[in-house]
Image (cartoon, coloured by chain):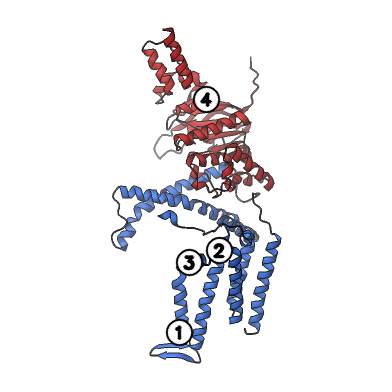
Chain colours: A red, B blue
Amino acid sequence: MESETTMATMIQTENLKYAYPAMEGEAQIFALQDVDLEIEQGSFVVVLGHNGSGKSTLAKTFNGVLLPAGGKVYVEGMDTADEHLLLAIRQRVGMVFQNPDNQIVANVVEEDIAFAPENLGVPSAEIRRRVDNALAAVGMSEFVRHAPHLLSGGQKQRIAIAGVIAMEPACIVLDEATAMLDPIGRQEVLSTIHRLNREKGMTVVLITHHMNEAEDADRVVVMDNGKVTMDGTPRQVFTRIEALRNMGLTVPDTVDLLDRLRKDGLDVPLDALTVEECADAIAHAVAVK
Amino acid sequence: MLKDITLGQFFPGDTAAHKLDPRTKILLVTLYIIALFCAKSVVSYGLLALTLAVCVRISRVGVKALVRGLKPVLFIILFTGLLNLFFTPGTRYLVEWGPVHISDTGLHNAIFMVLRIMLLIMGTFLMTYTTSPISLTDGLERLLNGLKKLHVPVHELAMMMSIALRFIPTLIEETDKIMSAQKARGADFESGNLMQKAKALIPILVPLFISAFRRADELAVAMECRCYHGGEGRTKLHVLQYARRDWIALFLGGAITAGVLVLRQFGL
């Protein structure tokens, strides 16, 4: 029986394959092999994987930066391989990259955020409204006339996010957008996207190799060798400690601690992900003992 | 060290000179240059110098800053002046001392030539001092819009210019980092003759270029992701609009230029 879902599909991939051009005489290596994913509207999905697992390649197929070598990618039912739909697709799925310096185009913050709506031919008054809204959404309103190169890394990345929000997309994909930031900057960016997801219902796809960024996600997808190897809630994924370690990934510190306590004979659950939950679980186990 | 370079040399302000539409200012500077090259007499030069003085006064840009702008071209000014002074044949010679001759036309030409270059440079600098590079590019794009029909890539040129301006501080910062990194590995940029100093720049330039290309690549993808597809159908956050002050300024500029042209007809 087909289950009736209330959520609509944002992005769907079918047997998605991708191969980077191979050197002469070498066998082609597929960066993506038969990826079938369905990302629901309004969800917060984290894609994890170590370097070379294909997670960034996957992200770039979501708005037609890379086109599939086999299979299909659909954004709200639109095929990314259809050139006529490319602008519409990119307007729906915004993308933020690793280095904020290389995605900011103007030397005044408001001009940069206006870039995308300007490209879309939005009337001036509406651009003004979108710029102000986008800046408010990332909490950077007071920097409207600033020069981006004088901001901190986290602030720059929030400007880059605002630049994408100004398109009014339904989904935002962050391709290792926190990798170059310091812990404070990373926290700024993460709380911004969590708020966008919660308050505006924006679909978020966060590509990362930091385990603890996945703790609050609705869903975690783990990639290895161009394939999806795990897919589930953070609790389901992170309790598979051995499988994660075999893929060269670490588990969150809390799970690691609980795992070691269990091995030493303490009866604690494995799936207490946050620090508070973990502390409660240990306290409980010690009290029972 | 490298961060001290002031580029574009824009002094933010809120005066009438700052508020003028960039197109107006570009047109006014063009008119001013035409007038300067048509001016022949003390009267017209006086008129043009007075015009500049009034504009400087309105803009509240310090005279010091304006004079500082002349420094890099001091050599050219001196060279032109001296060349005119000594090598213009004339009817009457004021000084004849060995091989050195100074004729009356020579003196006349030298003074006016130096004056002309100085006014020209200060007039142009006044524009860049009171207009941000972004609005200057914007103004140029709009002014040259008509050339699009002749397949001149006006939008692309303006986009290139504004991206270049955007990346100057980023690349300067990068150069600083690369220099520090190479110094940490024992590179020496200070000693040696000119040849050796030039060679020492190679380990800076190669990584700088590689990184610039990588940045360009990433920027292009990021721009495409933000729906950039050329100038077609593009709108603007800030639409340039002529205000009353622009028409007044253009009228005055036109009147002064016309005045200089009329004076020229009378041999003044």
Mark 2 vs mark 1: which is more N-terminal?
A: 2
Three-letter amino acid code at the position of disc 3: Arg
* Residue A205: quarter of image: top right
Is any atom of residue A31 visible in this view? Answer: yes
Q: How many marks?
A: 4
Question: Are the residues under badges 4 and 3 in a single subunit?
Answer: no
Residue at point 55% right, 41% down?
A159
Quick one: label 2, few (<14), some, or many (20+) residues within 10 Å?
A: some
Is A157 or A31 nearer to us in this picture?
A157
| Number of the label disc, if any, that sits on residue B87 | 1
Q: Do we see residue B147 in this rendering?
A: no
The residue carrying pointer 4 sits among few (fewer than 14), some (14 to 19) or many (20 or more) residues within 10 Å by Cα, namely some
The residue beneath circle 4 is A216
Disc 2/disc 3 C-alpha distance (Å): 12 Å
Q: CA distance from mark 3 to mark 1?
A: 29 Å
Q: Residue furthest bottom?
A: B92
Name the residue beneath numbered marker 2: B61
Q: Identify which residue is drawn at 47% across, 35% down.
A: A184
Observer-side mark, 4 or 3, equals 3
Q: Is residue B90 above or below residue A134?
A: below
- Asked if marks 2 and 3 fall on the same chain, the answer is yes
Dot in front, 1 or 4: 4
Which residue is the site of mark 3? B68
Amino acid type assigned to the residue bearing label 4 in the image: Asp
**Separation of residues labelled 1 and 4 (CA atoms):** 82 Å
Give the crowd class for mark 3: few <14, some 14-19, many >=20 residues within 10 Å.
few
Q: Mark 1 is on which residue type? A: Phe
